[in-house]
Image: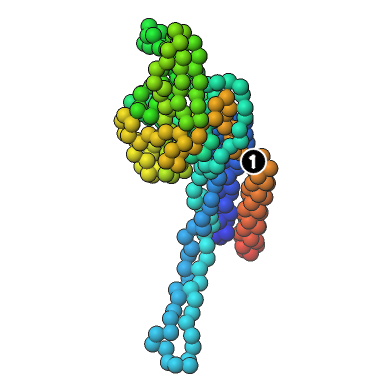
Protein backbone atom coordinates (compact mmCIF):
# COMPACT_ATOMS: atom_id res chain seq x y z
CA UNK A 1 0.00 0.00 0.00
CA UNK A 2 1.10 3.56 -0.59
CA UNK A 3 2.58 5.42 2.38
CA UNK A 4 0.72 8.56 1.28
CA UNK A 5 -2.58 6.85 2.12
CA UNK A 6 -1.53 6.27 5.71
CA UNK A 7 -0.19 9.82 5.92
CA UNK A 8 -3.60 11.08 4.83
CA UNK A 9 -5.35 8.96 7.47
CA UNK A 10 -3.02 10.31 10.18
CA UNK A 11 -3.71 13.87 9.05
CA UNK A 12 -7.48 13.33 9.09
CA UNK A 13 -7.36 12.00 12.66
CA UNK A 14 -5.35 15.01 13.79
CA UNK A 15 -7.72 17.53 12.23
CA UNK A 16 -10.71 15.70 13.68
CA UNK A 17 -9.23 16.27 17.12
CA UNK A 18 -8.53 19.91 16.28
CA UNK A 19 -12.18 20.37 15.28
CA UNK A 20 -13.26 18.78 18.57
CA UNK A 21 -11.15 21.29 20.51
CA UNK A 22 -12.36 24.26 18.45
CA UNK A 23 -15.98 23.15 18.85
CA UNK A 24 -15.59 22.94 22.63
CA UNK A 25 -14.05 26.43 22.71
CA UNK A 26 -16.97 27.88 20.73
CA UNK A 27 -19.48 26.07 22.95
CA UNK A 28 -17.91 27.74 26.02
CA UNK A 29 -17.60 31.24 24.58
CA UNK A 30 -19.94 32.58 27.30
CA UNK A 31 -18.84 30.28 30.13
CA UNK A 32 -17.46 32.24 33.08
CA UNK A 33 -13.85 31.44 33.91
CA UNK A 34 -13.36 29.14 30.90
CA UNK A 35 -9.85 28.94 29.46
CA UNK A 36 -9.63 28.01 25.80
CA UNK A 37 -7.60 25.09 24.51
CA UNK A 38 -5.42 24.72 21.44
CA UNK A 39 -3.89 21.81 19.53
CA UNK A 40 -0.36 21.44 18.22
CA UNK A 41 0.92 18.82 15.78
CA UNK A 42 4.21 17.00 15.23
CA UNK A 43 5.56 15.05 12.29
CA UNK A 44 5.68 11.29 12.70
CA UNK A 45 8.70 9.04 12.41
CA UNK A 46 10.29 9.25 8.96
CA UNK A 47 11.37 6.14 7.05
CA UNK A 48 15.02 6.34 6.05
CA UNK A 49 15.90 4.82 2.69
CA UNK A 50 19.52 5.96 2.85
CA UNK A 51 21.48 7.26 5.80
CA UNK A 52 23.82 10.23 5.88
CA UNK A 53 27.45 9.77 4.92
CA UNK A 54 30.33 11.97 6.00
CA UNK A 55 33.63 12.65 4.30
CA UNK A 56 35.72 10.56 6.67
CA UNK A 57 37.79 8.04 4.74
CA UNK A 58 37.16 9.72 1.39
CA UNK A 59 40.14 10.95 -0.55
CA UNK A 60 40.65 14.70 -0.68
CA UNK A 61 38.91 16.46 -3.58
CA UNK A 62 37.02 13.25 -4.36
CA UNK A 63 33.48 14.01 -3.17
CA UNK A 64 31.64 15.52 -0.24
CA UNK A 65 29.18 14.08 2.25
CA UNK A 66 25.71 12.78 1.44
CA UNK A 67 22.50 13.83 3.16
CA UNK A 68 20.00 11.23 4.42
CA UNK A 69 16.98 10.31 2.29
CA UNK A 70 13.82 10.13 4.36
CA UNK A 71 10.10 9.92 3.70
CA UNK A 72 7.67 11.10 6.39
CA UNK A 73 4.69 9.01 7.47
CA UNK A 74 2.27 11.76 8.39
CA UNK A 75 1.50 13.90 11.42
CA UNK A 76 0.41 13.22 14.97
CA UNK A 77 -1.13 15.19 17.82
CA UNK A 78 1.60 16.96 19.76
CA UNK A 79 -0.37 18.50 22.62
CA UNK A 80 -3.68 19.97 23.71
CA UNK A 81 -2.77 23.06 25.71
CA UNK A 82 -4.82 25.27 28.00
CA UNK A 83 -4.27 28.94 27.14
CA UNK A 84 -4.35 30.73 30.50
CA UNK A 85 -4.84 34.35 29.45
CA UNK A 86 -7.06 36.82 31.28
CA UNK A 87 -10.73 36.85 30.30
CA UNK A 88 -12.68 40.09 30.07
CA UNK A 89 -14.48 41.56 33.05
CA UNK A 90 -18.27 41.45 33.28
CA UNK A 91 -19.77 43.59 36.00
CA UNK A 92 -22.72 41.92 37.72
CA UNK A 93 -23.51 44.16 40.69
CA UNK A 94 -23.68 41.07 42.93
CA UNK A 95 -21.41 41.24 45.96
CA UNK A 96 -20.54 37.54 46.02
CA UNK A 97 -19.39 37.51 42.39
CA UNK A 98 -15.60 37.76 42.52
CA UNK A 99 -13.02 38.10 39.77
CA UNK A 100 -9.27 37.60 39.97
CA UNK A 101 -7.47 40.42 38.19
CA UNK A 102 -4.10 38.76 37.56
CA UNK A 103 -2.54 35.47 38.62
CA UNK A 104 -3.99 32.90 40.96
CA UNK A 105 -6.96 30.59 41.39
CA UNK A 106 -9.61 30.25 44.05
CA UNK A 107 -9.17 27.19 46.28
CA UNK A 108 -12.14 24.94 47.09
CA UNK A 109 -12.43 21.93 49.37
CA UNK A 110 -13.87 18.96 47.48
CA UNK A 111 -13.98 16.00 49.84
CA UNK A 112 -10.43 15.21 50.91
CA UNK A 113 -8.71 17.21 48.17
CA UNK A 114 -8.34 20.82 47.19
CA UNK A 115 -9.41 21.89 43.72
CA UNK A 116 -9.00 25.20 41.90
CA UNK A 117 -11.16 27.50 39.83
CA UNK A 118 -11.28 30.92 38.19
CA UNK A 119 -15.07 30.99 38.43
CA UNK A 120 -15.88 33.40 41.25
CA UNK A 121 -19.68 33.01 41.31
CA UNK A 122 -20.09 32.19 45.00
CA UNK A 123 -23.08 31.74 47.30
CA UNK A 124 -23.95 31.24 50.96
CA UNK A 125 -25.23 27.84 52.11
CA UNK A 126 -27.67 27.20 54.94
CA UNK A 127 -24.83 26.76 57.42
CA UNK A 128 -23.39 24.01 59.56
CA UNK A 129 -24.26 20.34 59.22
CA UNK A 130 -27.79 19.93 57.84
CA UNK A 131 -28.37 23.62 58.54
CA UNK A 132 -27.93 23.21 62.27
CA UNK A 133 -24.96 25.54 62.57
CA UNK A 134 -24.86 29.22 63.36
CA UNK A 135 -22.81 30.21 60.32
CA UNK A 136 -23.28 30.13 56.58
CA UNK A 137 -20.32 29.16 54.40
CA UNK A 138 -19.09 30.67 51.19
CA UNK A 139 -19.50 27.98 48.50
CA UNK A 140 -19.47 27.64 44.73
CA UNK A 141 -22.41 26.50 42.59
CA UNK A 142 -21.70 22.84 43.43
CA UNK A 143 -21.56 23.47 47.18
CA UNK A 144 -17.77 23.18 47.58
CA UNK A 145 -16.49 25.49 50.33
CA UNK A 146 -14.15 28.38 49.55
CA UNK A 147 -10.97 28.35 51.65
CA UNK A 148 -9.26 31.25 53.36
CA UNK A 149 -5.53 31.87 53.61
CA UNK A 150 -5.31 29.56 56.63
CA UNK A 151 -6.95 26.67 54.82
CA UNK A 152 -10.30 26.96 56.59
CA UNK A 153 -13.79 27.38 55.18
CA UNK A 154 -15.00 31.00 55.12
CA UNK A 155 -17.98 31.43 57.46
CA UNK A 156 -20.51 34.26 57.49
CA UNK A 157 -22.45 34.51 60.80
CA UNK A 158 -26.19 34.23 60.44
CA UNK A 159 -26.56 37.42 62.50
CA UNK A 160 -24.38 39.36 60.06
CA UNK A 161 -25.88 42.71 59.16
CA UNK A 162 -23.64 43.28 56.16
CA UNK A 163 -20.44 42.01 54.61
CA UNK A 164 -18.07 43.16 51.91
CA UNK A 165 -14.98 41.79 50.15
CA UNK A 166 -12.02 44.06 49.45
CA UNK A 167 -9.52 43.82 46.61
CA UNK A 168 -6.97 42.16 48.92
CA UNK A 169 -9.48 39.38 49.61
CA UNK A 170 -10.53 40.37 53.14
CA UNK A 171 -14.10 39.47 54.05
CA UNK A 172 -15.32 42.29 56.32
CA UNK A 173 -18.39 41.40 58.37
CA UNK A 174 -20.57 43.71 60.47
CA UNK A 175 -22.89 41.91 62.89
CA UNK A 176 -26.35 43.05 63.89
CA UNK A 177 -25.01 44.39 67.18
CA UNK A 178 -22.48 46.56 65.33
CA UNK A 179 -19.45 44.47 66.23
CA UNK A 180 -17.11 42.77 63.78
CA UNK A 181 -14.57 39.95 63.94
CA UNK A 182 -11.10 39.91 62.45
CA UNK A 183 -11.65 39.56 58.71
CA UNK A 184 -10.78 36.32 56.96
CA UNK A 185 -8.81 36.50 53.71
CA UNK A 186 -9.82 34.54 50.63
CA UNK A 187 -6.96 32.28 49.55
CA UNK A 188 -5.44 32.13 46.08
CA UNK A 189 -3.22 29.35 44.75
CA UNK A 190 -0.34 30.33 42.48
CA UNK A 191 0.14 27.46 40.00
CA UNK A 192 3.55 27.58 38.26
CA UNK A 193 2.31 25.56 35.28
CA UNK A 194 -1.42 26.11 34.88
CA UNK A 195 -1.41 24.15 31.62
CA UNK A 196 -0.59 21.07 33.70
CA UNK A 197 -3.89 21.22 35.62
CA UNK A 198 -6.53 18.59 34.90
CA UNK A 199 -9.99 19.87 33.97
CA UNK A 200 -12.70 18.01 35.89
CA UNK A 201 -15.76 19.97 34.75
CA UNK A 202 -17.78 22.73 36.35
CA UNK A 203 -14.90 25.17 35.89
CA UNK A 204 -12.79 23.15 38.35
CA UNK A 205 -9.21 21.98 38.02
CA UNK A 206 -7.31 19.24 39.81
CA UNK A 207 -3.63 19.35 40.68
CA UNK A 208 -1.34 16.97 38.76
CA UNK A 209 2.30 15.91 38.93
CA UNK A 210 3.25 18.44 36.22
CA UNK A 211 1.90 21.70 37.68
CA UNK A 212 4.86 22.39 39.93
CA UNK A 213 2.42 23.15 42.75
CA UNK A 214 2.56 21.46 46.15
CA UNK A 215 -0.92 21.21 47.61
CA UNK A 216 -0.73 20.74 51.37
CA UNK A 217 -2.94 21.23 54.39
CA UNK A 218 -3.61 24.36 56.39
CA UNK A 219 -1.92 27.45 54.96
CA UNK A 220 0.58 25.37 52.96
CA UNK A 221 0.56 26.41 49.32
CA UNK A 222 -1.94 29.24 49.82
CA UNK A 223 -1.34 32.89 48.96
CA UNK A 224 -3.26 36.10 49.62
CA UNK A 225 -4.61 38.39 46.88
CA UNK A 226 -2.34 41.24 45.90
CA UNK A 227 0.78 39.70 47.43
CA UNK A 228 3.60 37.55 46.13
CA UNK A 229 2.53 37.84 42.51
CA UNK A 230 -1.15 37.02 43.15
CA UNK A 231 -3.80 39.17 41.49
CA UNK A 232 -6.35 41.44 43.16
CA UNK A 233 -9.97 40.56 43.85
CA UNK A 234 -12.61 42.53 41.97
CA UNK A 235 -15.96 42.33 43.74
CA UNK A 236 -19.31 42.36 41.91
CA UNK A 237 -17.70 41.11 38.69
CA UNK A 238 -16.97 37.83 36.94
CA UNK A 239 -14.14 36.82 34.63
CA UNK A 240 -15.65 35.60 31.38
CA UNK A 241 -14.21 33.18 28.82
CA UNK A 242 -11.02 34.10 26.98
CA UNK A 243 -12.33 32.56 23.75
CA UNK A 244 -11.99 34.82 20.68
CA UNK A 245 -14.70 33.82 18.21
CA UNK A 246 -12.92 35.29 15.19
CA UNK A 247 -9.81 33.27 16.02
CA UNK A 248 -11.82 30.08 16.61
CA UNK A 249 -13.70 30.39 13.31
CA UNK A 250 -10.39 30.91 11.52
CA UNK A 251 -8.99 27.79 13.19
CA UNK A 252 -12.16 25.91 12.23
CA UNK A 253 -11.74 26.86 8.57
CA UNK A 254 -8.07 25.85 8.70
CA UNK A 255 -8.98 22.48 10.20
CA UNK A 256 -11.74 21.94 7.63
CA UNK A 257 -9.45 22.68 4.67
CA UNK A 258 -6.70 20.54 6.16
CA UNK A 259 -9.14 17.66 6.56
CA UNK A 260 -10.31 18.06 2.96
CA UNK A 261 -6.72 18.11 1.68
CA UNK A 262 -5.95 14.86 3.50
CA UNK A 263 -9.05 13.19 2.08
CA UNK A 264 -7.81 14.22 -1.38
CA UNK A 265 -4.51 12.48 -0.64
CA UNK A 266 -6.41 9.27 0.12
CA UNK A 267 -8.53 9.64 -3.03
CA UNK A 268 -5.49 10.19 -5.22
CA UNK A 269 -3.67 7.25 -3.65
CA UNK A 270 -6.72 5.08 -4.27
CA UNK A 271 -6.77 6.09 -7.95
CA UNK A 272 -3.11 5.12 -8.30
CA UNK A 273 -3.76 1.73 -6.68
CA UNK A 274 -6.70 1.23 -9.05
CA UNK A 275 -4.42 1.89 -12.02
CA UNK A 276 -1.93 -0.67 -10.69
CA UNK A 277 -4.68 -3.27 -10.36
CA UNK A 278 -5.85 -2.55 -13.91
CA UNK A 279 -2.38 -3.21 -15.34
CA UNK A 280 -3.20 -6.92 -15.47
CA UNK A 281 -6.22 -6.40 -17.72
Could you say whether the residue bearing mark 1 is in a helix, strand or loop? Answer: loop
Quadrant of the rendering where the C terminus is positioned: bottom right
Q: Quadrant of residue 219?
A: top left
In the image, is 38 to the left or to the right of 60? right
> Which quarter of the picture shows residue 5?
bottom right
Compared to 207, does 264 lie above or below? below
Disc 1 target residue: 244
- The N terminus - image quarter: bottom right
Q: Is residue 277 above or below residue 13?
A: below
User: What residue sits 40% from the left and 43% below the top?
Assistant: 211
Colour scheme? rainbow
For the image shown, how many numbered marks are present on the structure? Answer: 1
* Residue drawn 54% across the image and 47% down it: 39
Circle 1 packing at 10 Å, graded few (<14), some (14-19), many (20+), is few
Please tell me which residue lies in front, 193 or 199. 193
Residue for point 58% across, 20% down: 94
Amino acid sequence: MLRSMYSGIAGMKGFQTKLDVVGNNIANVNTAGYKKSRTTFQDMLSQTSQGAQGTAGIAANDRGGINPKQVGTGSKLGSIDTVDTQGFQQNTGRGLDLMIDGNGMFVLQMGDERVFTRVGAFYLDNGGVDGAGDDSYLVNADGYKVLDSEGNAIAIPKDAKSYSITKDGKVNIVKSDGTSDDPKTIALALIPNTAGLEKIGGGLYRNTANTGYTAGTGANGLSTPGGGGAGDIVSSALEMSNVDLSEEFTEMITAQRGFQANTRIITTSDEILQELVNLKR
